[in-house]
Amino acid sequence: MELNGKQVAILVEQVFNDHEFWYPYYRLKEAGASVFVVGSGSSRQYSGKYGTIATVDMEAATLVSSPLDGIIIPGGYAPDHMRRYPDMVETVKNHFVAGKVVAAICHAGWMLASAGILRGKTVTSFVAIRDDLVNAGATWVDEEVVIDQNLITSRKPDDLPAFMRSVIQELKK
């Protein structure tokens, strides 16, 4: 179990991309990590884009000052909801500044922009939010996975296998 002892949060809010939430959730558990589902505090359960339900283990306020080994931010429309909650944004920023793995896929780049951590970084995302990331100071590239220090980004659900290989590799360091 390559990630025994590692603790990873997966952020969630309404209309998360089901694939981008559940694939990392089970892949991390399979690798031996402790996985925590972290919500904004607006609900105990959130519904995905395709109707699956994710139940929250803790609220983002719990993590603002106590970083785990990593955070994964799924896409869908959830990142647009997440960034409305200061504790969610502050959690991402604090983990990044602490050098912890911050991994975002698809529309999750919105959270990175709101956290103010993109200036000078090379990233990827779903193409529709490219301008948002560039305007936040990032260099955007069209690649399945981009790793820039402790920041990992991917474009879409089809990239999940490469995304999670990269996340697990970085968490092992």
Image (cartoon, rainbow, N blue to C red):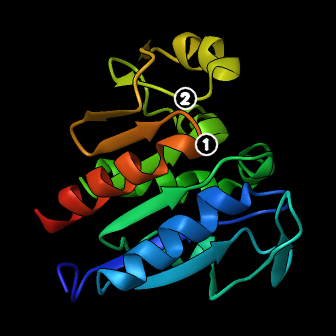
Query: What is the x, y in percent for residue 90?
Result: 54, 54
Q: Is residue 64 left or right of residue 156?
A: left
Q: Helix, strand or loop at disc 2?
A: loop
User: Between marks 1 and 2, how big is the CA–CA gap?
Assistant: 8 Å
The numbered mark, 1 or 2, whose residue comes first in the sequence reads: 1
- The disc placed on residue 108 is 1
- Label 1, secondary structure: give it: helix
Q: Residue furthest left?
A: 173
Amino acid type at circle 1 is Ala
Q: Give how far across and how far down residue 53 sits, in percent.
A: 81, 78
Residue at left 73%, top 53%? 82
Res 137 seen here: yes
Q: Could you classify mark 2 by the number of other residues whose Cα lies within 10 Å: few (under 14), some (14-19), or many (20 or more)? A: many
Q: Is residue 51 above or below residue 55?
A: above
- Specify whether 162 is left or right of 115: left
* Pick the front one: 94 or 44: 44
Which x, y percent locates residue 146?
A: 33, 31
Residue occupied by mark 2: 125
